[in-house]
Image (cartoon, helix red, strand yellow):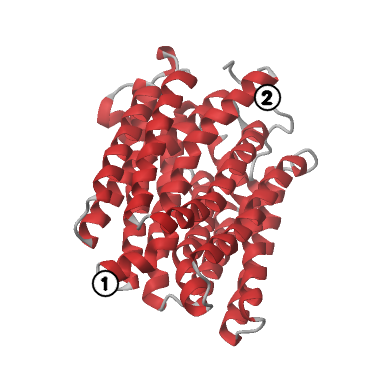
Amino acid sequence: MSSRQRLRLVLVLGSLIAIGPLTIDMYLPALPAIAADFQTTSAAVQLTLTGTLAGLALGQLLIGPLSDAVGRRVPLLAGIALHIVASVLCVIAPNIATIGTLRMLQGLGVAAAAVVAVAVVRDLFSGAAFAKLFSRLMLVMGAAPILAPTLGSGLLRWSDWRGVFFALAVFGVLLVTVAAFGLQETLPPARRRHGGVAATVRDYGSLLRDRTFVGLVLVAGLAMAALFAYVAGSSFVFQQQYGLDEQQFGLAFGAGAVGLITATQLNVRLLRRYSPQRILVTALAVGTAAGLVLVAFAATNFGGLAGILAPLWVVLAAAGLALPNAPALALSRHGEAAGTAAALLGAVQFGVGALAAPLVGMLGTGSVAMAAVVAGGMVAATAVLLIVVRPGRLAEVEPDPVAVAAY
C-alpha cells in the first residue's frame, strides 16, 4: 500500500469514525438545557445518551455478521441513511421519551460506520500493523470529542439544542457522499461468509469460546466505560458543580481529549519498541492508579477543578494507549470473521458504556459519582486483564507493519 493510498484510507475511515463521537458528544453542552426544556431530571436526560450507546451495541451485533456476508459498503450506506433520518426527527421531537427512542436509532445508524471502519482495517491489516493504523484513526476519534462540544457550544449561541441535531443530519449527508465515492469494497465475494442465522450463531459461539478474545473484549469495554462515565457526567460536574458556562465546558472537555489524542499517537512510536500487550498492561496500571487518585481528590475537593482535571487527563491518556492495543490483540486472532469479531468488540464496548452513563446519574451526577465510575472501569479492566486474559499467555503479534491485502 502506497503512502497516498494509506492517507486516503485514514481520511475516509476517520470520517466514518468521527460520526460516533460527534453523535455522542456534540449535544453534551445542551444536556442541562434539554432537562430544563422538558422539565425532567438530569438522570432522564442521561438516559438519552444510554439510548445512543445501546443502539450502537445492538447495531454492531447485527451489522457485523451482515457485513461479513454481503460486504462492507451496503450496510454502511444504509446505516448512515438511518442516522440522517433519526437526526432530522430529533429536531421535531415533542418529549424526552421520543428523544431517547430516536437517539437509539441514531446509535443503530452510527453502528454501521463504527463496525465497518474496524472491519475494513482488519480486512487490510493485522497485529501491530492494525494497532498502528488504528492509532492513527484514534487521532480522529480523539479530535472529534474535542471539536464536538465546542461545535455544540457554538451552535447554542444562535440556536437551541435542536440545532445540534440538524447539524448532525447535515454531517450525515456529507458522510454518506464520502463513503459512496471514497471507500472501495474491501471484502471480495470469495471471502464472504454465508449460512444465514445458523452461521452467525456459530461464529459468535466460536468467538465466545475463545477465553483470551473474550477477556480482551471485556478489557476494551471496561476501559470504554471509564470514558463514557466521563462523557455522561462531565457536563453536569463542570457546569453545575464548578460553574463553567457552555463555552468553558467545551474547552475543559477538550483538554481531556488532548490527553487521549497524545497517547494514541505516542502509541505508534511505542509499538516500534514494545509489544502491544506490554503497552496495554502498563497503560491499565497507570490508568487505575490515576483513577483512584481522582476519587480521592473528588471526595476531598482537593485542588478544586484542577484536582479533577489533572488525574482525569492521565486516565484518558491511559485509555488512549489501551484502546488501540486491546482490539488489535483480540482481532488478530479472528481475521476469518473480522466483521463479526469487530461487532462483538464494539457491542461490548458500547454496551458497557451504556451501563456506565446512567450509573453516574444514579449516584448523583457530582464529581464523586463520576470519579467512582471512571475509576471503577479502570480497576475492573485491569482485573480482567490479569485474571482472565493473563498477559503472559498472549501470543506475540508481528512487530512490523504488514498489509495483508491491497487497497
Q: How many marks?
A: 2
Residue 35 located left or right of residue 181: left
Q: Are marks 2 and 1 in contact (CB under 8 Å)?
A: no
* Res 180 quadrant in image: top left
Q: Residue furthest bottom?
A: 300
Above or below, comparing residue 176 to residue 294 in the picture? above
Q: CA distance from mark 2 to mark 1?
A: 52 Å
Q: Residue furthest front?
A: 158
Above or below, comparing residue 372 to residue 171 in the picture? below
Q: Nearer the viewer, mark 2 or mark 1?
A: 1
Q: Amino acid at mark 1?
A: Thr
Residue 153 located left or right of residue 358: right
Quadrant of the drawing holding the N terminus: top right
**Residue 329 shows in the view:** no
Q: Residue furthest right?
A: 273
- The residue depicted at 65 percent of the width and 76 percent of the height is 307
Mark 2: secondary structure = loop
- Residue 115, horizontal then vertical, whole percent: 43, 36
- The residue depicted at 34 percent of the width and 45 percent of the height is 166
Quadrant of the drawing holding the C terminus: top right
Dot 2 surroundings within 10 Å: few (below 14), some, or many (20 or more)?
Answer: some
- Residue 258, horizontal then vertical, whole percent: 65, 54
Mark 1: secondary structure = loop
- The residue depicted at 30 percent of the width and 51 percent of the height is 103
Q: Amino acid at mark 2?
A: Val
**Residue 360 shows in the view:** yes
Of residue 305 and residue 314, the one placed in the foreground of this image is 305
Of residue 214 and residue 134, the one placed in the foreground of this image is 134
Query: Label 1 belongs to which residue?
Result: 40
Query: Label 2 belongs to which residue?
Result: 402
